[in-house]
Amino acid sequence: MPFLFSLQAVLRWRESFERRERQRLEIVTRELVKAQQQKQQAKMERANALIQAQKKLHRGMTAAELQFELACDRARARRIAVCNEHVARVEDLRRLQVEVFRKAQQQRKILENLRGRQLAAYQLIQVRRTQQQMDDRFLVTRVRRLPDS
């Protein structure tokens, strides 16, 4: 009689659920990396623009050009702030998804451990049955060899 785990359907569902949560975690992680790259890009653009503005300032600028550069810098600073907020939101989402994934993983492992223990018990019973059958055969052959008294 082969081993049958009574909760096999539940285990398969838990494995499927864990895979889905892992995929969601990967998606959120990719989104976080993308958001961090956008933030870094915005910072680099602002730094480069400030360097260019300083060069223009040393060569001489009109007040209107200076005001325009300051307005552009404020816009770049707002973009960086928006990027910071986006990164923070995605980091929070990632933390939550890590928790969901860990719980799904833990629930699957619990069922796998239960399956493993039941399989070990089944195998032990099978070994004992096999040993009992061998013992019985040995005794039967031994009894046949005994002289009649």
Image: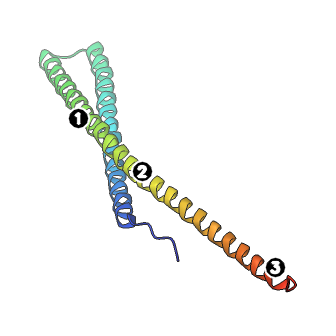
Relative vertical location of residue 135 with respect to residue 18 in this rendering, above or below? below
Q: Which residue is mark 1?
A: 89
Secondary structure type for disc 1: helix
Is the residue marked by circle 1 packed among few (<14), some (14-19), or many (20+) residues within 10 Å? some
Residue depicted at x 17% and y 17%: 66
Relative vertical location of residue 93 with respect to residue 2 in this rendering, above or below? above
Report the number of discs: 3
Secondary structure type for disc 3: helix
Nearest to the observer: residue 99 or residue 129:
129
Pinpoint residue 57: horizontal percent, then vertical percent.
Answer: 26, 15
Cα separation between marks 2 and 1: 32 Å
The amino acid sitting under disc 2 is: Ile
Residue depicted at x 60% and y 62%: 124
Secondary structure type for disc 2: helix
Q: Is residue 34 visible?
A: no
**Disc number lying in front (2 or 3):** 3
**Disc number lying in front (2 or 1):** 2
Checking the image for residue 110, the label placed there is 2
Relative vertical location of residue 148 with respect to residue 10 in this rendering, above or below? below
**Disc number lying in front (3 or 1):** 3
Tell whether label 1 touches label 3 (CB within 8 Å): no
Tell whether label 3 touches label 2 (CB within 8 Å): no
Is the residue marked by circle 2 packed among few (<14), some (14-19), or many (20+) residues within 10 Å? few
Checking the image for residue 142, the label placed there is 3
Pinpoint residue 111: horizontal percent, then vertical percent.
Answer: 41, 55
Q: Is residue 116 visible?
A: yes
For residue 134, what is the image quadrant?
bottom right
Image quadrant holding the C terminus, namely: bottom right
Pinpoint residue 93: horizontal percent, then vertical percent.
Answer: 26, 39
The amino acid sitting under disc 3 is: Arg
Going from N to C along the chain, the mark reached first, 2 or 1, is: 1
Residue depicted at x 32% and y 34%: 41
